[in-house]
Amino acid sequence: MPSQDRVALREAITSLPAYVPGARGGVGRFSYKLSSNENPFPPLPGVLAAVADAAADLNRYPDMYAGELVEAIAALHGVKPGRVVVGNGSVAVLEFVLDAVCETGDEVVYPWRSFEAYPIVVSVAGASGVPVPLLPDGRHDLDAMLAAVTDRTRAVLLCSPNNPTGPALAGDDIRSFLAAVPSHVLVLLDEAYTEFVRDPRAIDGVPLVDDAPNVVVLRTFSKAYGLAGLRVGYAVARTRLADGFRAASTPFGVNALAQVAALESLRERPALLARVDELVAERDRVTSALAAHGWDLPDAQGNFVWFGLGERTSAFAKACVEEGVIVRPFGAEGARVTIGEREANDVVIDVARRFLS
Ligand SMILES: *Cc1c(COP(=O)(O)O)cnc(C)c1O
């Protein structure tokens, strides 16, 4: 019943789907958490030391726009610092990208199932979400996404590799897609897992920003760099757009510890990428074992695999938990399982094997 005597929340907020975080382990119970696509490696000693050092200055505000970090990110990608915008995790960056371009009622097209933050940030920005179902093999249906673009479309979100299904978008497909999308529609390419991609046809988004003025690329320190707990992500875009995103961002949005940790991680990038190589080798071991047992899974290009189990999803998740491994079920669609510690991955292989027989 509408009430006149209490503060009303916006309809877009009260109707939001909840962001369900990956389950955490029960207290006192031994378990592996393969439910949030986290990096199983602890921070590098140099990163921990930089954070401990910076903690002595916590009475000071951080550098408002994280200038040193922005320069290091820009140098990594060979772009001008003005094209880089950082935020409190790439989800926060996505929020202010949409806040900066969406008027109330504008449409934002995104693949589905995909990252569960998408419907939430779209609604909070006042826009209206247009989810486009994935193809049966877990890939984006780019033709259907193109067909979903209307006069009211302000942005299209693409996720490569797609969380939770795994395939990466092909460079050729994205270039044709961009050629067909009107240039006033922002195309955001979320590349949270790009460091894990080994598909040679996969898109590398950052160079696209040179070719197409409407492209925005989103990256994060949460996955390959293992800094999920500190929250740092960034967008790369043409300077005019980047200026707008920065204007819409939270002042002092990246905290002081996150700034030094991300900077140190860029300095120690080779060591972190060596860990990514180990996780990719582990991913390939897991997918080969599963294929040998008869599983036909979508192409896994991130640090996770997708079991499209339908109605059997929750039974599978339960069987994993009983063996001490927490995975991420999505309703009656499927379960996403992060590549983690070798012992944990072995449990998953074993449960999955039993599940087929
Ligand atoms: C994990 C993830 C992110 C990263 O979010 P942060 O806010 O940077 O931790 C972004 N996009 C997708 C698709 C993800 O899976």
Image (cartoon, grey):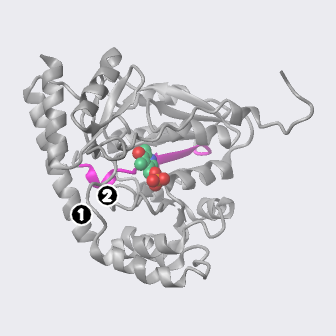
Q: Residues within 10 Å of mark 2 (few under 14, many from 20)?
A: many
Q: Which mark is residue 69?
A: none
Closer to the camera in the image, 108 or 239: 108
Quarter-wise, where is residue 41 in the image?
A: bottom left
Whether residue 310 is visible to the viewer of this picture, yes or no, is yes
Is 176 included in the stretch rendered in magenta? Answer: no
Quarter-wise, where is residue 219 in the image?
A: bottom left
**Identity of the residue furthest to the left in this view:** 292
Check disc 2 and report the residue beneath it. 224
**Left or right of 315 in this view: 91:** right
Q: Secondary structure at mark 1?
A: helix
Check disc 1 and report the residue beneath it. 273
**Left or right of 63 in this view: 27:** left
Which segment is the magenta one?
Answer: 183-197
> In which quadrant will I find the N terminus?
top right
The residue at 78%/37% (across/down) is 9
Residue 107, given in percent of the width and then of the height, sits at: 64, 34
Gap between marks 2 and 1 measured at Cα: 7 Å
Q: Is mark 2 within 8 Å of ligand 1?
A: no
Is 187 included in the stretch rendered in magenta? Answer: yes
Q: Amino acid at mark 1?
A: Leu
Residue 37, given in percent of the width and then of the height, sits at: 34, 46
Residue 74, given in percent of the width and then of the height, sits at: 44, 71
Residue 251 drawn above or below residue 153: below
